[in-house]
Image: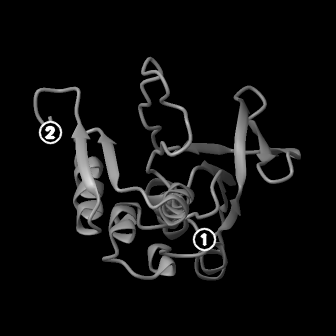
């Protein structure tokens, strides 16, 4: 039996570990679009704020450890671009090379997470220096921008948990921080 899990991080990696505990014989494959299959996404704001000092502290477990400990076939930088339900197969694109390959499955688990809401109606929203915070790659891009540009002010769009956490952490780094929230209150 082959199980394909689309997406890693909390949902996909923990699902894979649970499936392994239920069956030692199952072939379990994870396809993760990003470069990290299991990381502390709640820690990303704290890394940017300096409370978490080491980049490697954000990575919970590597593909190599998941292979050795749980016999999981973890594929990073691999995006599932189509699903053929009738044929029970997925087409996977290597995001670094663009090459594609088809993989069959007996069971399919979708654990792709979420996408940030980026209000495209706001003029200039897509310009340089505007970021979302969801992944290790996003965190690295924000840190590179801070190091290169040395901004003094930051605007956080969204007053949910992550928005408030990143606002607090950047304020600790002496940025002038403003929060813009569409609802009547934060954490609504």
Residue drawn 33% across the image and 49% down it: 154
Most distant residue in the top direction: 121
Q: Which image quarter is the C terminus in?
A: top left
Q: Which image quarter is the N terminus in?
A: bottom right
Residue drawn 57% across the image and 50% down it: 7
Residue 139 disc label? none
User: Left or right of 135: which side holds 34?
Assistant: right
Estimate the x, y position of residue 65 in percent, counting from the top left: 61, 80
Residue drawn 72% across the image and 36% down it: 81
User: Left or right of 81: which side holds 48?
Assistant: left
User: Left or right of 42: which side holds 180?
Assistant: left
How packed mark 1 is, by other alpha carbons closer than 10 Å (few <14, some 14-19, many 20 or more), is few
- In three-dimensional space, the C-alpha distance between marks 2 and 1, rounded to whole angstroms, equals 46 Å
Describe the element under mark 1 as helix, strand or loop: loop
Q: Is residue 7 above or below residue 14?
A: above
Residue receiving disc 2: 186
Front of the two marks 2 and 1: 2
| Residues marked 2 and 1 touching at CB (< 8 Å) | no
Estimate the x, y position of residue 138 in percent, counting from the top left: 52, 54
Residue drawn 57% across the image and 58% down it: 137
Q: Earlier in the sequence, mark 2 or mark 1?
A: 1
Describe the element under mark 2 as helix, strand or loop: loop
Residue receiving disc 1: 24
Q: Nearer the viewer, residue 150 or 65?
A: 150
Most distant residue in the left direction: 185
Using the rendered view, name the quadrant where residue 183 is placed.
Answer: top left
Q: Nearer the viewer, residue 18 or 170?
A: 170
Estimate the x, y position of residue 76 in percent, counting from the top left: 69, 60
User: Left or right of 120: which side holds 3?
Assistant: right
């Amino acid at each position: 039996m082959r199980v394909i899990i689309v997406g890693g991080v909390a949902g996909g990696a923990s699902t894979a570990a649970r499936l392994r505990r239920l069956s030692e014989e199952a072939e379990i494959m994870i396809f993760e679009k990003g470069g990290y299959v299991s990381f502390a996404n709640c820690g990303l704001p704290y890394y940017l704020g300096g409370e978490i000092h080491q980049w490697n502290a954000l990575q919970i477990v590597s593909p190599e450890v998941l292979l050795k400990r749980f016999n999981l076939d973890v594929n990073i930088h691999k995006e599932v671009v189509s699903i053929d339900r009738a044929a029970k197969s997925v087409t996977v694109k290597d995001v670094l090379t663009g090459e594609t390959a088809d993989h069959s499955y007996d069971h399919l688990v979708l654990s792709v997470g979420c996408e940030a809401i980026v209000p495209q109606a706001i003029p200039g929203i897509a310009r340089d220096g505007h970021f979302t915070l969801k992944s290790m790659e996003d965190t690295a891009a924000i840190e590179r921008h801070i190091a290169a540009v040395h901004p003094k002010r930051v605007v956080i769009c969204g007053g949910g948990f992550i928005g408030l956490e990143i606002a607090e952490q950047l304020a600790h780094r002496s940025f002038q921080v403003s929060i813009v929230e569409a609802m009547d209150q934060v954490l609504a």
